[in-house]
Image (cartoon, helix red, strand yellow):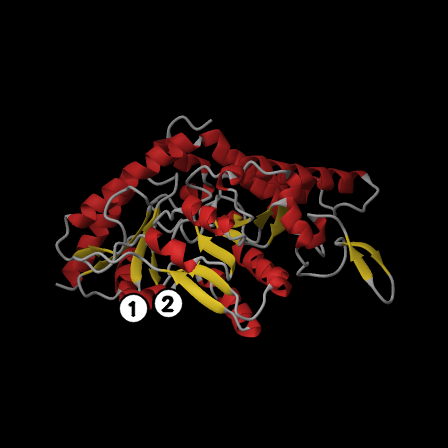
Amino acid sequence: MLLNLKECKICFPIFQKHPNLVYLDSASSTQTPQTVLDAVNDYYINYRANIHRGLYDLSGTATQKYEEARKTVGKFISASSKEIVFTSGTTHGLNLLASGVQNTLQPGDNIVLTEMEHHANLIPWQKIAKKKGMELRFIPMNREQRTGNSYELGVSDIENLIDEKTKIVSFTLVSNTLGTINPAEEIIARAKKIGAITIVDAAQAMAHMPIDVKILDCDFMVFSGHKMYGPTGIGVLYGKKERLEALEPFFYGGDMVRSVSYEDATWADVPEKFEGGTPNIAGAIGLGAAVEFIQSTGFDKIQNHETQLTNKLINQLNSIPDARIIGLNSEEKRIGVVSFLLKDIHPHDVAEILNRDQVCVRTGHHCTMPLMKKLGLPGTVRASVGIYNTEDDIDKLFASLARVMAVFK
């Protein structure tokens, strides 16, 4: 149990290696705690073997640990282990879904997304819509008279956009660019009324808030391990069992088959049906350890800690006359992902000077190029917090931003 999040950095070896590092890019990838590294190393050192088919002890142990990780992840989001498919990440999961549902779609149907989507939840649906002669619709952001954008979705538009021709509703739970928490329950409730399939991109939310798929009642959900203190190259596709059973597989090969002849093949039961080939065994085990790390810390502590840091970050940005926050101007309805601009200074120039002070932020369009174009921006500076950040990190960020301002005065 982590009793004091102010001392949380000791759990992450990278901060011992780089004691002056101010890491404010958790929205891109979080750092990895020692417990997760230990779990991955334990696999490689003590029971490295392939899973499911080996009739020897090492393989049996690897299979047991892999399936225990599946159960751990399932319980984390209130799902059955049979509803958890291991993928390489959110992008893999979304492409799997787009491919798997396409045979159920017809010309004239429509797919509803939002204006905030990451490219991973946009391009697969663009391709399917063009292939099938379907319409893509986007839930817009509300207009706000003073700034032009409220940076929240227009809930009143949901009713009209999701209609009897809507077959897929796929949306981000939290914007990776704006930090906005979207009204998932309202979107899903409307989609259910007309029988549309609902898909939630929870990549940006999973490390920051509790998520219960039974309460959300979504059909599918996707997320990535590397954004929740886990390894890279591992992710999760959650699906209601009956939805997964109806879905066509995306990869074909070993371990996803029931029987094979020279002429045909049948598929294994879910979730193995979607895990063709040797999976990322170490990654799955590491993801299970990451979930246990988050659970041992507790979401109450995580949310309180990150809200304090987000408030400090927003308040200090608001105290700079030449700073402009691109997103909600309070901690409500948002997480600790804060995009901003500094005067007319290009975001890349800001990041370069910050880097000299070992302050890590992200710049650019954040894989939301259509959103940036809509906002009329070339990109933003994005600072995002994790459980290892402290108020001292925020102070160091603003000390470095003062140097940026001095260079471009």
Q: In which quadrant of the rendered view does residue 277 lie?
A: bottom right
Query: How many neighbours does mark 2 have within 10 angstroms: few (below 14), some (14-19), or many (20 or more)?
Result: some
**Which residue type does callout 1 highlight?**
Pro
The spot of residue 123 in percent (x, y) is 49, 67
Q: Is residue 70 left or right of residue 6?
A: right
Which mark is nearer the camera, 2 or 1? 2
At mark 2, the secondary structure is helix
Crowding near pointer 1: few (<14 within 10 Å), some, many (20+)?
A: few
Please give left or right for residue 90 compared with residue 209 in the image: right
Query: Which numbered disc flags the more N-terminal residue, 2 or 1?
Result: 2
Residue sitting nearer the eye, 330 or 24: 330
Which residue is tagged 2?
370
CA separation in Å, label 2 and label 1:
11 Å
Residue under the point 57% across and 62% down: 98
- Picture coordinates of residue 115, whole percent (x, y): 37, 61
Question: Is residue 176 visible in the rendered structure shown here?
Answer: no
Q: Is residue 102 left or right of residue 308?
A: right
Q: Residue at x 26, y 44 (%)?
A: 394
Image height of 26 relative to 380, above or below: above
The quarter of the picture where the C terminus appears is bottom left
Query: Do labels 2 and 1 touch, CB within 8 Å?
Result: no
Q: Which residue is mark 1?
A: 378
